[in-house]
């Protein structure tokens, strides 16, 4: 008998979602989609999407310097990120520059017009706080219940005194 015939087939049963389909992952995905949709609506008058705004914001904060870093940070597809950066570059909001340390790498920088538009874009209502017109002050930590505050914030506040 062959090795295949001798091997026992085991049935692997995937965990089943609750009958109502409301798993944590599903709900988080729906919340993310809803928040991005609301942000897209607010940014429409500027000709930007929520993902384009997120790219501008991450570049301004310095949390990412290259398209690859943006993809990892935002958990986004490389092809889609290239298209987003292309559109931002066409609009004059972002520049691509060769890295001085590694000429193979392309660094993304906010163009002057991107830097001037960012405060206006950031002043839009926060999608995470429906009805809010101030971002992020309406979502500031003191309005959150203590149990919902991230632990690192609590520990930082304790260490500051």
Image: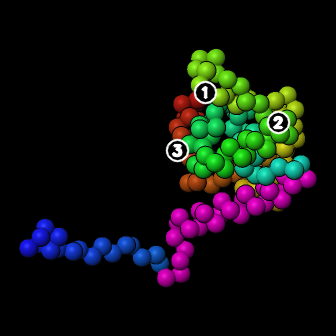
Marks 1 and 2, the one that precedes in the sequence:
2
Q: How is the image coloured?
A: rainbow
Contact flag, marks 3 and 2 (Cβ < 8 Å): no
The residue that disc 3 covers is: 151
Disc 3 and disc 2: Cα gap in Å? Answer: 36 Å
> Which element carries disc 2, helix, strand or loop?
loop
Residue 38 in magenta stretch: yes
The residue that disc 1 covers is: 105
Identify which residue is drawn at 53% across, 40% down.
152
Label 3 Cα crowd, 10 Å radius (few <14 / some 14-19 / many 20+): few
The residue that disc 2 covers is: 93
Question: Closest to the observer: 32 or 11?
Answer: 11
Disc 1 and disc 3: Cα gap in Å? Answer: 36 Å
> Which element carries disc 3, helix, strand or loop?
helix
Residue extending farthest to the left is 1
Q: Quadrant of the C terminus?
A: top right
Q: Quadrant of residue 63?
A: top right
Image coords of residue 90 (percent x, y): 83, 39
Identify which residue is drawn at 63% across, 33% down.
66
Tag in front: 1 or 3: 1
> Which element carries disc 1, helix, strand or loop?
loop
Residue extending farthest to the right is 45
Tag in front: 3 or 2: 2
* Above-or-below relation of 143 to 30: above
| Residue 133 shows in the view | no
């Amino acid at each position: 008998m062959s090795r295949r015939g001798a091997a026992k087939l085991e049935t692997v049963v995937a965990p089943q979602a609750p009958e109502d389909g409301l798993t944590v992952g599903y709900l988080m995905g729906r919340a993310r989609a809803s928040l991005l949709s609301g942000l897209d609506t607010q940014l429409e008058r500027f000709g930007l999407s929520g993902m384009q705004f997120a790219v501008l914001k991450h570049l301004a904060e310095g949390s990412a310097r290259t398209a690859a870093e943006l993809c990892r940070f935002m958990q986004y597809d490389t092809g889609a990120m290239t298209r987003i950066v292309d559109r931002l570059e066409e609009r004059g909001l972002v520049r691509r520059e060769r890295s001085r340390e590694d000429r193979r790498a392309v660094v993304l920088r906010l163009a002057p017009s991107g830097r001037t538009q960012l405060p206006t874009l950031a002043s839009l209502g926060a999608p995470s706080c429906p009805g809010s017109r101030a971002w992020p002050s309406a979502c500031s930590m003191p309005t959150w219940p203590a149990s919902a505050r991230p632990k690192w914030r609590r520990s930082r506040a304790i260490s500051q005194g």
